[in-house]
């Protein structure tokens, strides 16, 4: 999905990678993601780098060709890197123990495409598997960063029902003080 120059510079910076590692590592330490994890929309790979240290097997799915090539060059020897859409995943049903996505849902241009991603996450998860992650929420700084970008922010009030409609249960959606939405949902067993 399109990102403006400033946004691309920030997301590909060492400073952003360090921030992601600092924030994501404690979050991962609290979770058992299982043996086969799918990351949707890793972009420049800051989250991928942290996940590779925490899970035994990682597959990443990236829609942008240039980002896919970058991810293959950086992580292709340690992760399966697949180019494709989260709304039409090229994976078998019930393959993954966990599906994650971090700060990418707001780059999906329509609610119907987001809903297709949620449904596909449910399809590729094993029964009892978890779909979880985080995304930004609207505030002035977030809006300014996304001028000229695709920006379709998830509404935390409607998000639980959307995940339930996709087939999930035990839905938990939280919004932290710094306007970060976090979520988890389980595919019923």
Image (spheres, rainbow, N blue to C red):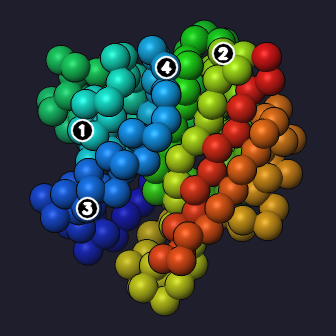
How far is disc 3 from disc 4 in space, using C-alphas? Answer: 25 Å
Residue under the image location 21 percent in, 55 percent down: 17
- Are there few (<14), some (14-19), or many (20+) residues within 10 Å of tag 4? some
Q: Earlier in the sequence, mark 3 or mark 4?
A: 3
Instruction: Return the mark for residue 126.
Output: 2
Q: Earlier in the sequence, mark 2 or mark 3?
A: 3
- Indicate which label's residue lies in the foreground, 4 or 2: 4
Instruction: Return the mark for residue 34.
Output: 4
Indicate whether 37 appears above or below 138. Answer: above
Residue under the image location 39 percent in, 39 percent down: 29
| Percent coordinates x, y for residue 144 in the rendering | 42, 85
For label 3, the residue is 19
Indicate whether 45 appears above or below 177. Answer: above
For label 1, the residue is 49
Residue under the image location 37 percent in, 64 percent down: 3
The foreground one among 24 and 9 is 24
Q: Earlier in the sequence, mark 3 or mark 1?
A: 3
Q: Are marks 2 and 1 in contact (CB under 8 Å)?
A: no
- How many marks do you count on the picture? 4
How far is disc 4 from disc 1 in space, using C-alphas? Answer: 17 Å
- Are there few (<14), some (14-19), or many (20+) residues within 10 Å of tag 3? few
| Percent coordinates x, y for residue 137 in the rendering | 56, 72
Indicate whether 92 appears above or below 100. Answer: above
């Amino acid at each position: 999905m399109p990102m403006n120059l400033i946004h691309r510079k920030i997301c590909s910076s060492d400073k952003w990678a360090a921030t992601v590692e600092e924030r994501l590592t404690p979050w991962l330490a609290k979770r058992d993601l299982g043996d086969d994890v799918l990351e949707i929309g890793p972009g420049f790979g800051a989250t991928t780098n942290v996940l590779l240290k925490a899970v035994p097997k990682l597959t990443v799915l990236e829609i942008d060709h240039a980002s896919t090539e970058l991810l293959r060059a950086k992580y292709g020897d340690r992760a399966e890197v697949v180019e494709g859409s989260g709304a039409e995943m090229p994976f078998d049903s019930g393959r993954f123990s966990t599906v994650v996505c971090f700060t990418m849902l707001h780059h999906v241009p329509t609610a119907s495409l987001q809903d297709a991603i949620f449904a596909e996450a449910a399809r590729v998860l094993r029964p009892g598997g978890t779909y979880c992650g985080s995304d930004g929420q609207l505030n002035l700084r977030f809006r300014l960063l996304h001028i000229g970008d695709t920006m379709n922010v998830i509404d935390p009030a409607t998000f639980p029902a959307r995940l339930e409609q996709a087939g999930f249960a035990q839905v938990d959606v939280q919004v932290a003080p710094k306007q970060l939405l976090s979520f988890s949902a389980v595919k019923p067993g």
